[in-house]
Amino acid sequence: MDEERADALKLLGTKESIFTQRIVWALKFKGICHEFIEQDFSSRSSPLLVELNPVYKKVPVIVHVGRPLCESLVILEYIEETWPLINPLFPLDPFDRASARFWARFIDGKFYEAAKKAFFSSGETKAEGVESVAEGLHLLEGQIIGKKFFGGETLGYLDIVAGWISYWFQYVEEVGEFKAMDSRKYPCLHAWINNFIQVPVVQESLPKPDAVKAVFRGFKDAAALTGAN
């Protein structure tokens, strides 16, 4: 490993952020030294974040050898391409790599938006969101059947992208007042959740439940306040 490049790596993030934790897991899994610069959810307008991510003004952001890079999926690919020989995250087979990217986009796109709809909405709209979440869980169940992790026997890219479902999703349901995850309906996904959160680099990085719930309550309160104005 190029020690000079690793030592120059900084990560701006928030411990409770699902997107930040992806980068933490990947770096720890590969054993890449980095400096973590803690932000908070109210710091989107902080001078440092505006300077490093002027487009979205949000975490995570990595700064490697003085150059900033944003968006968690982009950062994960950069980490893999920069340190490809240390605990590879992507499958070797080109088809499997493309498939992992497809499902990562599904998780960050259709599934994430369905979860937001179920979380923030009420009435029929909320029911539609919950139904879409259940559909997404069913599709992910199909991808994990017969496997310990999405990529096989070891932690990989898609596991890291889907990792928030293993821990954060239960609090999304609790604060959002809906229920979609069911171990009887999705036994393979449930087994994956148990396997994933037992990975040492994951387990040691998980934020406290109260902190996660406080963040989600803040999101709901802010949305309610916006809707009332």
Image: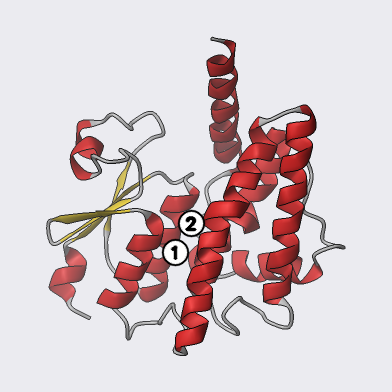
Whether residue 206 is visible to the viewer of this picture, yes or no, is yes
Instruction: Name above or below for residue 175 compared with residue 20.
Output: above
* Left or right: 64 in relation to 137: left
Residue tagged 1: 25
What residue is at 35 percent from the left and 49 percent from the top?
60
Could you tell me residue 143's position as x and y percent? 67, 74
The residue that appears at 12% across and 56% down in the rendered structure is 66
Q: Position of residue 53 (x, y in %)?
A: 25, 43
The residue shown at (58%, 49%) is 112
Residue type marked 1: Trp
The residue depicted at 75 percent of the width and 41 percent of the height is 128
Residues packed near mark 1 inside 10 Å, few (<14), some (14 to 19) or many (20 plus): many
Task: Point out residue 152 in the picture as x, y percentages from the top left corner.
Answer: 60, 84
Can residue 200 be seen here? The reply is: no
Residue lying at the far bottom of the rendered structure? 93
Callouts 1 and 2 close, C-beta under 8 Å: yes
Q: Along the line of sight, which residue is nearer the eye, 38 or 101? A: 101
Residue identified by numbered label 2: 205
Mark in front: 1 vs 2: 1
| Quadrant (top left, top right, bottom left, bottom right) of the N terminus | bottom left
**SS assignment at label 1:** helix
Mark 2 crowdedness (10 Å alpha carbons): few <14, some 14-19, many ≥20 = some
In terms of secondary structure, where does tag 2 sit?
loop
Q: CA distance from mark 1 to mark 2?
A: 8 Å
Indicate left or right for 208 with 37 as reference.
right
Q: Quadrant of residue 6?
A: bottom left
229 up-or-down from 109: above or below:
above
